[in-house]
Amino acid sequence: MRIVLEAAVLGVLTGGVYALMASGLTLIFGVMRIINVGQGALVILGAYLSFALSRSIHLDPFLTLIVTMPVMFLLGIGLQFVFIRPLKTDREALSVLITYAIALGIEGVLGFFFTTNYIELRAWYETASFAIFGFHVTWVYVFGFLLCLAILGALFVLLYRTSFGAALRATMLNRTAAQLVGVDVDRVSALAFGIGVATAAAGGVVFGVTNAFNPGSHYDLISRLLSIIVLGGLGSLRGAIIAALIMLVTTDIAAVVISPVWASFVFFIILVLVLIVRPQGLYGVRVRERI
Amino acid sequence: MHKAALGILAGLSLVLAACGTNNNQAAQSAGPITIGVSLSLSGDFSGDGKALKQGYDLWAQDINAKGGLLGHKVTMKYVDDASSTQQVVTNYQTLINQDHVALVFGPFSSLLTIPASAVTDRYGYAFPEPAGGGPKVFEKGLHSIFFVQPATVEDNLVSYTQWLLALPPGQRPKTAAYATQDDPFTQPQVDKAKGLLEAGGVTTASYKVYPAETPSWDTLALQVVNSKADVVILGTQEPDAVAFVKVFIQQHYNPKSIIETTGPDQGKDYADKVGAANTEGIMVPTGWTSDSTAFGSQQFVREMVAKYGGSAGDISADSAEAYSVGQVVDQAAKKANSIANKDLINALHSGTYQTVQGPISFDSIGRPHGVGVFIEQWQHASAVFVYPSSVAKAKPEYPKPNWS
């Protein structure tokens, strides 16, 4: 029983990180109706940028976000402008190919500059912990979780308490109607893509201090992130957070109760069952399209 | 009669001289050859793949400096398999059919060697390989594969279990926890060690098998922590080897002994990741260390340091294993007086070959008979042989000191 509780705590803490990484992916889908399969690679790019900064100027990995988030935000806007905006027809299918190409490009560049060896972000508190009822909770997970809460909270404020958020949600609901009421959907799309990529930087730093990674780590990552946003409902930020927690908690508990080999399978059983009952995911919106 | 004998001798010497000239001409006219290798330069095994490449490159440099492989200048051609079992098959097909390489050397891991060996065997290539020694590698009974290490993989932890069971009864561990990747390299070692220790009276406190793509190793490590086992035996690659140790430190779990199948053998890279002070007492099975005095080992160490920098302790055992592949092929080519794959296969099935890992011979399906795999332990920020006593440079630290 004790190990199950410990696994659940760990699942919640790591689930927060995945929620942050998936939030950018679901935001981009919500606004632009494209699946950014490059999000995993952008997370890894964020981790490498933090690694380079923390190594060169001996900055704490979390503090590197002061630099990496704005840089990644601008990179996101640039990527949207150059690769996504020109897509006029068949956006959903073509965007998968283009963002996959972006992912491969990022992997290649990172491999060239950093080699393919596994690395980790180092911090003085990476092995420091405090005890609660005999279970040592690691500070690095707590810091990571708090950072995720802060950024996700900021995202909610942006979405629900600002005029830009209103424009963004309007674009998510109906792009054409938003245009008709004067929303500059191209600008909103570019900024949403930038925000999505900036969250990848934040997710990357937390992923990097808790996991070893190399340029190829994005493959495993994107498959999990896609599963999360499908379970949560494509385009739903709230859904991504809940689904991330479900995924990490169930896999961690299944790993200790059943077997690590079956852990991912248990999550996918939940995913399939949810999709049978709610094809739109936990918080997704059912959309009828006229053919 | 005397004149006739002189005539015969003169004729013979002319023939012999002609033969000698022909041999020299043959050696001089031997064209350059390419040796193809699929390496994991990205993906899960990229650290090991890079270390193998260093060993292969150094061997190619050395053999070319000596005039080539039986007179043939050697060029290495590497193709990245991204640690993928599908890509490694494509790579060897391409190397053989498209690039027409003269020889092929092996990739990293049993996982990749198994599918790769089916391809190379189909085309009749000799397949000397440095890192595929799991039992499944030999299950097909291929005649063309040669695992160039001092023992088969499943025996890697036998020395460790012998050492544990030979401890005085008061010190001998009572419980052991096991966790291993479901990998043909790691799991057979751990399973065999588990069987031997159980037979020796050591109770299994925990046993977990996990897939390499497990999202988080922390939960698995927590199970080991909760088992409170006296000793921990882990079937790891480097990333999970580091992750397990970090969780043990976080949870203030101090078993009397820890051994990991891979990770601690990666020298400075491993020490940097877990912290040099935290390496103290951690063990790893290995057939080679930088202070080995086996055939050519010290020269290999000097050349590695000169070529790649760092210190002797930074050299990965993977590099030594790759270099050994080249040494074995060089000696087999000389023995067969040929670099034809068929001749190399025949030559490698008999005799003993000197390598930086010690003398190695092969049975009919390529399993090695060498000096065995020893136990290395991190002591004072460097890894040293500690068991068996015949090769030990220091006494094993037991119990392992607490985390710093």
Image (spheres, rainbow, N blue to C red):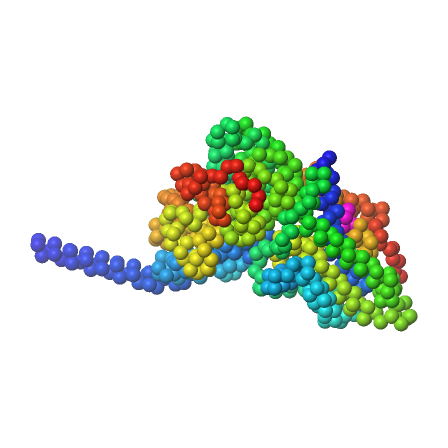
Q: Which image quadrant: the C terminus of chain A?
A: bottom right
Task: Answer whether residue B204 is magenta in the image.
Answer: no
- Of B129 and A60, the residue lying toward us: A60
A247 magenta-colored: yes
User: Residue at coordinates 55% horizontally, 53% vertically from top-left?
Assistant: B272
In-front residue for pair A124/B298: A124
Residue B53 image offset from top left, x and y in percent: 49, 56
Query: Seen from this angle, which residue lies furthest right?
Result: A181
Answer with the quarter of the image where residue A147 lies.
Answer: bottom right
In the image, residue B201 sits, relative to residue A76, either above or below, namely above
Q: Which residues are magenta?
A: A243-248
Q: Quadrant of the N terminus of chain A?
A: top right
The residue at the point 38 percent across, 52 percent down is B298
Viewer-proximal residue among A36 and A93: A36
Residue A201 location (% of width, % of height): 70, 61
Task: Note whether residue A170 is visible.
Answer: yes
Question: Residue A185 lies in what quarter of the image?
Answer: bottom right
- Nearest the viewer among A249 and B226 is B226
Residue A211: x percent and y percent?
64, 52
- Name the quadrant containing residue B188: top right
> Viewed as shown, does residue A268 lie left or right of A106?
right
What is the x, y in percent for residue B151? 46, 41
The residue lying at 63 percent from left, 38 percent from top is: B224
Tell me: B26 left or right of A186: left
